[in-house]
Image (tube, rainbow, N blue to C red):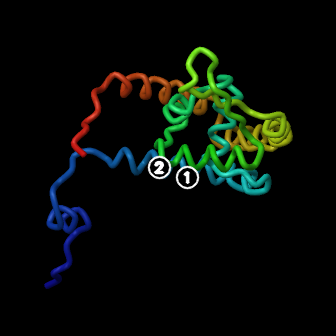
Amino acid sequence: MSTRRSPKAAASAAGPAFHHRNLPLLLLQAREGVMAQFRPILNAHGVTEQQWRIVRALLEQGPLEPRQIGQVCRLSSPSLAGVLARMDDLGLVQRARIPQDQRRVLVQLTARSQALAAAMAPQIEAAYAAIEAHIGRDFIDGFYAALDELIGLLGSLPADDAD
């Protein structure tokens, strides 16, 4: 007689039973699938994923304070400080004190980063087009709508700060 257990039985014997799929892991897997289409472009232009997120945020929203960049780009304050310092060294961003409050700083793109983004735009748009051609416009439209709704709904959910 075999003592092998089914994968489901083995999983339940190994730990607690979860009733939901692993949403964070699924979102990470989807993100990695998408980023695989963009990483070669970023690498070819010498831009990290974090740097590109910041460039895109500043392109779309204009100058922002570091705190705002961290919120939009989902970067922790210590990580953001390092990324911004490196971007400053590379001439991709410039920081300026806010005249009304010298304690605050605005970060904006330089002409160099704007030119870099313009050079990358055709490749980035081609990657989006390839993704859309592969999975379909209707799926993309529905997925954007679902993501926007999910972000909005989760934004109103209190965070568990049990750290």
Picture coordinates of residue 112, whole percent (x, y): 83, 39
Picture coordinates of residue 63, whole percent (x, y): 66, 25
Q: Is residue 88 left or right of residue 26?
A: right
Picture coordinates of residue 84, whole percent (x, y): 62, 43
Q: Is residue 103 left or right of residue 154?
A: right
Q: How crowded is mark 2: few (under 14 residues within 10 Å), some or many (20 or more)?
A: few
Q: Are marks 2 and 1 in contact (CB under 8 Å)?
A: yes
Location of residue 1 (image quadrant): bottom left
Determine which residue is flagged by label 1: 32
Separation (CA) of disc 2 from disc 1: 6 Å
Location of residue 124 (image quadrant): top right
Picture coordinates of residue 117, whole percent (x, y): 79, 38
Residue 28 — which label?
Answer: 2
The residue drawn where x is 57% and y is 49% is 82
Which residue type carries mark 1?
A: Glu
| Residue 105 makes an appearance in the image | yes
Q: Residues within 10 Å of mark 1 (few under 14, many from 20)?
A: few
| Residue 37 makes an appearance in the image | no
The residue drawn where x is 38% and y is 46% is 24
From this viewpoint, which residue is outermost toward the top? 100
The residue drawn where x is 72% and y is 38% is 93
The residue drawn where x is 79% and y is 52% is 45
When the figure is inspected, residue 138 is found, relative to residue 29, above or below; the finding is above
